[in-house]
Amino acid sequence: MSAEELLNACARGDLDAAKLLATADIINSQDKEGHTPLLWASNGKDDLLKFLLTVPNVKLECRDNDGMTPLLTAVSMDGSMGCLQALVEVGCDVYAKDTCGMGWKGWSRGQTAKREYMEEIIKNPPKIAVKEVKEVKKTPAEKKAEAAGRLQPQQSKKIRATAESVVFGMDDADNIDEDGNLIDADHHATKSKVCVVS
C-alpha cells in the first residue's frame, strides 16, 4: 500500500480502493500539487469524503499548494452539498482563506445553494459537543515569551482541543468560564473542559 496508490484512488473517487489503502500513516500524503486524499474527496465525492473523515489522523485543515482547504474546495465545486455539510459538521474552519486571501464567499460564486447554506451557518453556528480534550503543553518559545512578559495567559485566546469536533464558531474565549469549562448559549457551564492556552 502506497501513498501514491491512495492519492490516485481518491482522485478517481474509488471508495473501494480507498477503503483498502487508507491508513493513518499515509492519510495526509500529498501529491506534487499538494492535494491530499481528503482534498481529492472534497471535490464532490460524498461517500469517499465521509469515509476518509473516519480514518485516524486525517487533517481537516490540509492545504494544497494554492492554500485550498477541503471546505473551500467543497464550496467551490458544482454538485452535491454532501461534502460541504460533512466538513462543516466535523468542525472545519469556515473562515479559512486560500493563499490569495479568498474565503468561502469568493469561492461560492455561482453556487447559490452552497452560499446560502454557508451564510446560515455563519449566522447560526451549530453547537457541536467536544468529545475529548488533551492537555496542551506550551512550547519552549511560548514559555519564554510568557516569562519575559511578552505573552500573557489567554492573550491569544486560542483553544486547542482534540475532539470529534469542536464548538463551531468559537473564535475567542468568551464561551469559556474561568475554570476552562465550555459555556452553552444560555451561559451554563457544560461538563466538557477545554484548554485555553496562549
Image: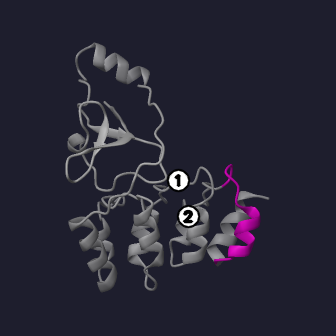
Give the residue at x 36% y 24%. Answer: 142
The quarter of the rendered structure image containing the C terminus is top left
Residue 143 visible in image? yes
Q: CA distance from mark 1 to mark 2?
A: 8 Å
Residue 17 covered by magenta stretch:
yes
Q: Amino acid at mark 1?
A: Lys
Circles 1, 2 touching at the beta carbon (< 8 Å): yes
For disc 2, the marked residue is 38
Question: Which circle's residue, 1 or 2, is located before the other in the chain?
Answer: 2
82 horizontally vs 117: left or right: right
Q: Indicate left or right for 26 with 32 as reference.
A: right
Q: Quadrant of the N terminus?
A: bottom right
Task: Classify residue 33 by image quadrant.
Answer: bottom right
Q: Position of residue 103 (x, y in %)?
A: 30, 65
Is residue 47 left or right of 158 when viewed as pictured? right
Secondary structure under tag 2 reads helix
In the image, residue 48 sits, relative to residue 145, either above or below, namely: below
Residue at far right of view: 1
Q: Is residue 113 above or below residue 189?
A: below
Question: Taking the image as drawn, is residue 110 in sight?
Answer: no
Residue shown at the point (32%, 77%) measured from the top left? 108
Residue of label 1: 59
Residue 175's spot in the image, x, y percent?
24, 45
Segment tinted magenta in the rendering: 13-26
Picture residue at 33% right of the left edge, 73% below the top: 107
Specify the amino acid type for callout 2: Leu
In the depicted view, which residue is nearer to us: 88 or 156?
A: 88
